[in-house]
Structures are given as C-alpha cells and as structure tokens.
Image (cartoon, rainbow, N blue to C red):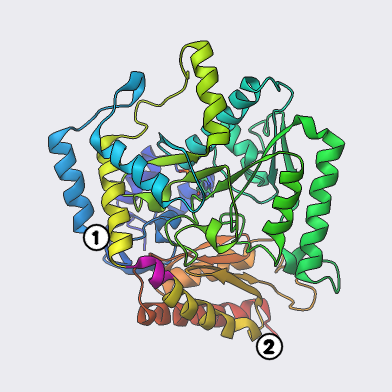
C-alpha cells in the first residue's frame, strides 16, 4: 500500500525520479513499490511486506539478495585498489584473474575477454568489433547484422536496434541501418497447423537463408541471438533450431554472437545456454549473473577469428579506439570472481537443473487451467502464457491486460514476477529450494484462480 504522506518515499519518488521501463504518466498516480532490503530469495518493501523475488531482480541475482561473501570481496578490493582501468596496456589482478577464468570456462575455444559495464554496452561493443573486423579483412561491405523479432539485446542506439521489440524502437527513430530482423522461433504461437518443431525450425532456417541471399551474403557480418529469448517472453527454441540456423551461418561464413546475458552462469541447468542448445558462438556476451548484479559488469569473449583481424587493424591504426572508463572495474571484477566461485562451490548449476526440473513440472501441471495457453522453460527460467480462449489463443481484450491482472494478484500473494505481454515469467535466484518453488507456484495458482471470474464471468 502506498504511503500518501507528502514527504513519504513514494511521494518523493513521484516528485524527483523518472523510471526505466515505466509508463511515466501512470506512475504519477500509482507511485512506486519501494524495496528496502533483501534476504536470500526474498525482498522486503518499506511497509514490511516480504516477496519471493521470482525474477532474481532483473534475471540476474544468482546467489540471492544477502550474500556476505560478495560484500566482503567488494570491501577487500575497495580498500586495496578502488579503481583502475585497462587502457594503454594497464592491468590489475582482479581483471587478469577474471579474464583467465572466463576464457577457461567458455564451452568453445575462446581467445580473449573484453570488459564493459552492461549488457547493452557489451552488445554495442560486439557490433563495433564486428564492423572493425570486416574492415580489417578488406570486406567493408560486410556490415549487416541479423537479429530476431522479440530478441532482446539492450537499449543503447545500436543494441536497441538489435532488440526486436516495438517498444524499444517506437519514437526513438530506431532501428539504425544495417540491422535486419528474422522470425521468432516460437512454435506454439507461429507454427503452421500440423507443423512439427523440426519442420518449423527448418522453415525458419530456410527463411534465414533466403534473407541472406536477398541481401547478398557478402554484406552479412553476423547473426546474434539469445540461446533462450528472455525479455521477448522466454521463448525456448524448438527442436533442431540452433543446429539448422548454424548450418546456414557457416555456409556463408557469418559470425555467430550468443547473447548469454540471461542464460549464462547456470540459468538453464548448464553453465551456459550455448551448452544446453549446442551453440558454437564466435562471440559470447556475458553480464547479469556474472556478478549476481551486485555491481555492474559485463564481458565479451571472442575467438581467434574475431581477435586476430582486430589486433592487426589496431596495429595498423595505432590503437583499438574503444573502451569505457568503468569497463572491468576492479571492485566489480572482484565481486564477479567471488560470485563465480560461489556458483561453482555450491553447485548452483546443478541446483538450477534439479530445482528447475521441479519448477517446470509444477508449472506444467497448470497447463489445463482455463487461462493457461502455454507453459515453457528450461532449468530455472520459465514462462506461462495466458489466454482468454485456449482454442484460438486469443488474448483478453487488449494484449497484456490479462498478464498485468495476474501479475498484480501475484504481487498481492507475495511474489514479484513480470508479465511480458501476457506471458508471466519466472526466473528466480539459483539458490531457490523446492519448498520455495512450491510457495511460489501455489501463489501463482491462487492468482490465476483470482483472475478467472473477471475473464470468464459466466463461469
Ligand atoms: C539477453 C540480454 N541482452 C542484453 C541485455 C541488456 O543488458 P543491460 O540492461 O545490462 O544493458 C539484457 C537485459 O535484460 C538481456 O536480457
């Protein structure tokens, strides 16, 4: 319940703070939910209400909201060397250690790690590296990048252009030139009647090849995709999808960028989503669970095919003219190292597999509920797409209205989730237990039942 006193935190938030991903006009009426503290998989608001954080914040807090070892790692590094950078051949121990760790962890041979502060910056940097490489190879026409509708890659001018969601383009004059979007691999929504997952995947691979041929293969530099699409609604690729897409890319010598910002560090029950789906990327983009978002940090892993021409070009020009002041910040790097150590020590990847299987099984039991269209997910990431009519998959009035209604009930029932349109997402901290999953899914069930009489008043 919002505190209406004129100097309450809620009132001051409305007065002074403009939010990301928020209807700014509506916010003036509803005000914020002010979160005050965290404890394991729970967060607590200023009125003392506790919630299971079923989104791990923004798909990112793997170790939960009260991990002392990350606090200590930050404090130690802050006392020793609070800031340094990697420009002009400078280095510092946390970054050297983290680069080595990440290259060694990579599921495919990688050459170097490069550090940035956010997923958006990392994807922006990936585009710049890809363009720089094409020029280095004497292929200046090879600049186009293929992304996917409903893919999410960030919000900077270039990374928002990769993102395939209308709200990230509308009124921002995006996308920029040279970014193409191909179809979403969402079998339940987009397959033709009777089309199997394999047939659907083959059709999308064929569509990709036609796009490449129509544009001219010599103009296509790279393809970018999330192993599982996150913000686009947790879209799990259909059988055969990545295998068939990669066959087309290798035929035309097109680089593959795996955006592992959500899937990386255990989410799907393997250390990387690329392992879960047999993806062999040339560039991997990492963020979020790399530090459990306790501090901002992101990284690109690049293979020799990417690094070697870039190294030659930087030698020709005199420098690689790119770098962020805070990129590879020593305190963030120290936290990331400790966080990865925790993920390994506590086998949180195994927990994502085991407790994830329980989450998936419990959610799938809801498939027969009158409001449930599709249940999808792998490991500790899932979504339940809601419909007003199971047969036609029609939404309840305006798209997202039902998602918002159920998400509201869910919050009243002590669970913070997020509706992406009519898909309710679940992406809890990797430390979650089966008993906590039961509390979460029970609350979701009650929320569905609370919404039902509004959607079908006649019963
Ligand atoms: C797959 C993916 N890539 C990139 C980003 C952008 O990351 P950031 O918000 O740190 O810029 C996100 C953020 O949700 C993401 O989910």
- Using residue 165 as the reference point, say whether residue 63 is left or right of it: left
Magenta extent: 347-352
Does dot 2 land on a helix, a strand or a loop? loop
Residue 17 spot, x, y in % from top left: 39, 40
Depth check: give the residue in front, 248 or 407: 248
Q: Please rate how many residues cluster around mark 2, counting C-alpha atoms within 10 Å: few if below 14, some from 14 to 19, many from 20.
A: few
Q: Is residue 6 above or below residue 432?
A: above
Asked if residue 185 can be seen in this view, the reply is: no
- At a point 62% along the width and 68% down the height, the residue shown is 402
Where does label 2 land, which residue?
459
Label 1, on which residue?
66
The residue that appears at 41% across and 55% down in the rendered structure is 60
Give the main secondary structure, helix, strand or loop, of the magenta stretch. Answer: helix
Task: Give the position of the C terminus as an image quadrant.
Answer: bottom right
Residue visible at 30% across and 54% down in the picture: 339
Instruction: Name the quadrant containing residue 331.
Output: top left
Residue 361 lies, with reference to residue 66, above or below; the image says below
Q: Quadrant of residue 369?
A: bottom right
Q: Is residue 349 magenta?
A: yes
């Amino acid at each position: 319940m919002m505190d209406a006193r004129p100097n309450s935190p809620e009132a001051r938030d409305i007065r002074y703070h403009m939010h990301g991903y928020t209807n700014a006009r509506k916010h003036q009426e509803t005000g914020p939910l002010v979160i005050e503290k965290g404890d394991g998989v729970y967060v607590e608001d200023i009125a003392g209400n506790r919630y299971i954080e079923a989104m791990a914040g923004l798909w990112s807090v793997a170790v939960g909201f009260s991990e002392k070892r990350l606090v200590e790692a930050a404090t130690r590094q802050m006392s020793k060397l609070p800031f340094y950078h990697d420009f002009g051949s400078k280095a510092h121990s946390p970054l050297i250690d983290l680069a080595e760790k990440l290259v060694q962890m990579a599921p495919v041979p990688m050459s170097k790690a490069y550090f940035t502060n956010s997923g958006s910056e990392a994807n922006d940097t990936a585009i710049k590296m890809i363009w720089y490489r094409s020029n280095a190879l004497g292929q200046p026409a090879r600049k186009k990048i293929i992304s996917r509708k409903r893919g999410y890659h960030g919000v900077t001018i270039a990374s928002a252009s990769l993102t395939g969601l209308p709200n990230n383009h509308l009124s921002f004059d995006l996308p920029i030139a040279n970014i193409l979007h191909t179809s979403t691999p969402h079998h339940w929504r987009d397959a033709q009647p009777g089309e199997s997952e394999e047939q659907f995947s083959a059709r999308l691979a064929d569509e990709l090849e036609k796009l490449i041929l129509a544009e001219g293969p010599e103009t296509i530099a790279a393809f970018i995709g999330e192993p599982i699409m996150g913000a686009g609604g947790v879209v799990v690729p259909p059988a055969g999808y990545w295998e068939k897409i990669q066959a087309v890319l290798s035929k035309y010598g097109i680089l593959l960028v795996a955006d592992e910002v959500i899937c990386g560090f255990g989410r799907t029950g393997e250390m990387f989503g690329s392992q879960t789906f047999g993806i062999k990327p040339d560039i991997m983009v990492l963020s979020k669970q790399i530090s459990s978002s306790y501090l901002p940090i992101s990284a690109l892993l690049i293979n020799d095919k990417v690094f070697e021409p870039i190294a030659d070009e930087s030698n020709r020009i005199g420098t690689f003219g790119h770098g962020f002041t805070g990129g590879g910040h020593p305190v963030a790097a120290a936290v990331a190292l400790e966080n990865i150590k925790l993920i390994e020590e506590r086998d949180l990847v195994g927990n994502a597999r085991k407790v994830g299987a329980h989450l998936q099984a419990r959610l799938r039991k809801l498939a027969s509920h009158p409001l449930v269209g599709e249940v999808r997910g792998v490991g500790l990431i899932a979504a339940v797409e809601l419909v007003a009519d199971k047969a036609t998959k029609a939404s309840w009035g305006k798209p997202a209205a039902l998602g918002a209604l159920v998400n509201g009930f869910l919050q009243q029932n002590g669970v913070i989730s997020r509706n992406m349109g009519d898909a309710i997402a679940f992406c809890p901290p990797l430390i979650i237990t089966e008993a906590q999953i039961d509390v979460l899914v029970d609350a979701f069930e009650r929320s569905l039942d609370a919404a039902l009489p509004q959607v079908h008043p006649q019963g």
